[in-house]
Image: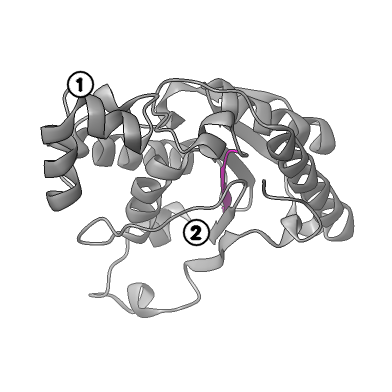
Amino acid sequence: MRLILIRHAQTVANDEGRWQGHSDYPLTPAGQAQAQALADALAHEEARQPGEWIDPVLYSSSLGRALATARPIGQALSVPIASRDALREYDVGVFSGCTATDLDRDYPQIIERFRRDGHWDDVPQAEPVAARAQRAEAVINQLLADHADGQTVIAVTHGGFMQYLVAALLGTRRIWGFRPENTARFEFTLSAAAQREDSGSLGGLSTYRCRINRFNDCVHLNSVSRR
């Protein structure tokens, strides 16, 4: 399977420095341009390398910002969008919709502890971290079960949950943090059989069975303003 994970385009909340989680904000004009630039880049690649675009399918988080990013992709590739709650951003609880200034004013003890320890389970109403990891594992397993090894699968999701999806793909022993850019592409080649292998087997030690092809790739934004 060729799996392409994409973070949504810039939103008003991104521009204003607000936590989002399950709260939804529209794309900015810059975000709309980012989404279109990504769609154009994908369509160009499909036209140039049709043999690598086998029966493409497009999934999106059911949150509005992800669907708004997925729409121009669906139009450019002539594929429908399958909306999935499982691809939604994790709930950030009482941080939702807040700027750093808001948090300092309204939740001083909670944000001080969070900045010190980074423990989401200390944030009221936030999705527990164990539940996020389990949800990401379930998403990857479902995609592998539902699609053929040679198929191209695109999923538009969110920056926070992306970190759990990548951890599920790579089989890391812990969650590594990184900052996905708006409309960044993360592309992997894998199969259901190879995903079950580990370093105790020859297949698991091969660098050809599973591949990272792109990671936080934003080359399509070279001619687009990110603000």
| Quadrant housing residue 217 | bottom right
In the picture shown, does residue 112 fall above or below 88? below
Foreground residue among 130 and 191 = 130
The vertical placement of 211 against 53, above or below, is below
Q: How many marks?
A: 2
Marks 2 & 1, CB-CB < 8 Å contact: no
Residue type for callout 1? Gln
Residue 137 vertical placement versus 19 (above, below): below
- On the image, the x and y values in percent for residue 214 come to 58, 64
Residue 215 in view, yes or no: yes
Amino acid type shown at disc 2: Leu
In the image, what residue occupies the spot 44% across and 22% down? 85
Q: Residues within 10 Å of mark 2 (few under 14, many from 20)?
A: many
Determine the secondary structure under disc 1.
Answer: loop
Residue 165 within the magenta-colored segment of the rendering: no
Residue 90 horizontal side relative to residue 73, left or right: left
Residue 88 spot, x, y in % from top left = 43, 28
Under circle 2, the secondary element is loop
Q: Which residue is mark 1?
A: 125
Q: How is the image coloured?
A: one colour
Distance from label 2 to label 1 (Cα)?
A: 35 Å
Q: What is the chief secondary structure element of the magenta stretch? A: strand
The dot on residue 139 is: none
Q: Which residue is nearer to you in this view: 211 or 22? A: 22
Residue at the spot of label 2: 190
Residue 184: x and y, percent?
A: 59, 52
Question: Which residue is at a point 63% across and 53% down the rendered structure image?
Answer: 150
Q: Nearer the viewer, residue 223 or 112?
A: 112
From the viewer's perspective, is the residue at label 2 or at label 1 nearer? Answer: 1
Answer few, some or many: residues within 10 Å of disc 1's Cα (few below 14, many 20 plus, some between 14 and 19): some
Span shown in magenta: 1-8
